[in-house]
Image: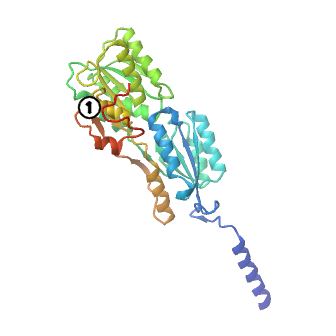
Amino acid sequence: MKKNQNIGIAALVAVLLLTPATVFAGGKKDAGAASGGLIKVGIVNLPPEESGYRQANVEDMNAVFSKANGYDAKQTNTGDNSEQIAAAQGYIRDGVDYLLISAANASGWDNVLKQAKSAGVTVFLFDRLIQTDVANYQAALVSDMATEGNTAMSWVLSQNLPAYNVILIRGQLGSAAELGRSAAVLKARDAGKIKIVADGTGGDSWSLEEARKVVEAAIAAGKDFNVIYAENDGMAQGAVQALDAAGITHGKGGKVKVLGFDFNRFALRNVQAGYWDCDVQCSPRQAAEISKWIKDAANGMPLPSGTVFQKEVFADTASITDDLITKLGINADPGKGVVTK
């Protein structure tokens, strides 16, 4: 009888030794267990062509979530919300450990987030929030878009203009960035502090060309305006092209105040040169912080939960410095004194 017991124990030990190391702890699979020690990450993001901000963001994700850094990562880039959702579902089926999402649209994500949770996939949002219950994702590392808008509008209202006649050029309608940045403008209008003389959009791609058309149409209609509030740097660039073509002065000492978002270095150099007036930071560098969360979790530390906001600033012609452009700017630097039209 004892001999049979010993044989049974030996067989059990052999089975345990040969079983693949895909184990579950607290209902969640151990990250990296099924991919040769690499942590599997699926990234659902927007296309780099959307803006200078997005180009920097996509490159940052690729650089941080690399095999050299211990990751088996894939990134999908599309501005179509349904395509993003399909990509997320594909990553869940593939058994990723972590799913990172920057959503094209803030709504429509409930089902796929619940699928991820049921599959034991940890979800982080980055750059943009989603309209869903916070229980449907682990944490979100984002810019506070409402604060960005409030920062921008506070700057506008500090300019002591006799009246504030604003052309609002929105980004992709319904995106977290558009909703947050537009809210401050609409609030100021409702309070009677400003007048919105034209309300347009650069479309889903935050297009320079579409922004230029918004301003061209306002000029052709004889609209009187003295503020351009463009919700990214590319659209501010398009707006200024329309002003230049019409011979309307802008920037420091000009008729029209020009404000953009994102902190592209070309935009910051334009502010420094007085060609534009102000730019509000929106940092695309979330990858390193999220990677730290993941590596800390692998060492037994708890993951953050809820919304984590990045700290961001603004720069105008009075406050901008070379050091700020070097440290906080994104994408190529055209050089001091170079104006990008």
Image-based side of 161 in relation to 111, left or right: left
Q: Name the spot of residue 68 as percent of width and height, x first.
A: 54, 57
Mark 1 residue element: helix
Give the answer, above or below, for where 300 lies relative to 114.
below
Image coordinates for residue 62, horizontal then vertical, percent:
53, 47
Q: Is residue 256 visible?
A: yes
Q: Label 1 sits on what residue type? A: Trp
Q: x and y percent of residue 136 in the render?
A: 52, 48
Question: In the picture, which quadrant includes the N terminus?
Answer: bottom right
243 or 117: nearer the viewer = 243
Image location of residue 112, percent across then percent down = 59, 44
Which residue is nearer to you in this view: 236 or 18? Answer: 236
Residue located beneath label 1 in the image: 155
Q: How is the image coloured?
A: rainbow
Q: Residue at x 45, y 64 (%)?
A: 301
Please tell me whether residue 334 is drawn above or below residue 97 in the rendered image: above
Quadrant placement of the C terminus: top left
* Residue 217 drawn above or below residue 191: above
| Mark 1 Cα-neighbour bin, 10 Å: few <14, some 14–19, many ≥20 | some
In this rendering, the count of numbered labels is 1
Seen in the image, is 221 located left or right of residue 80?
Answer: left
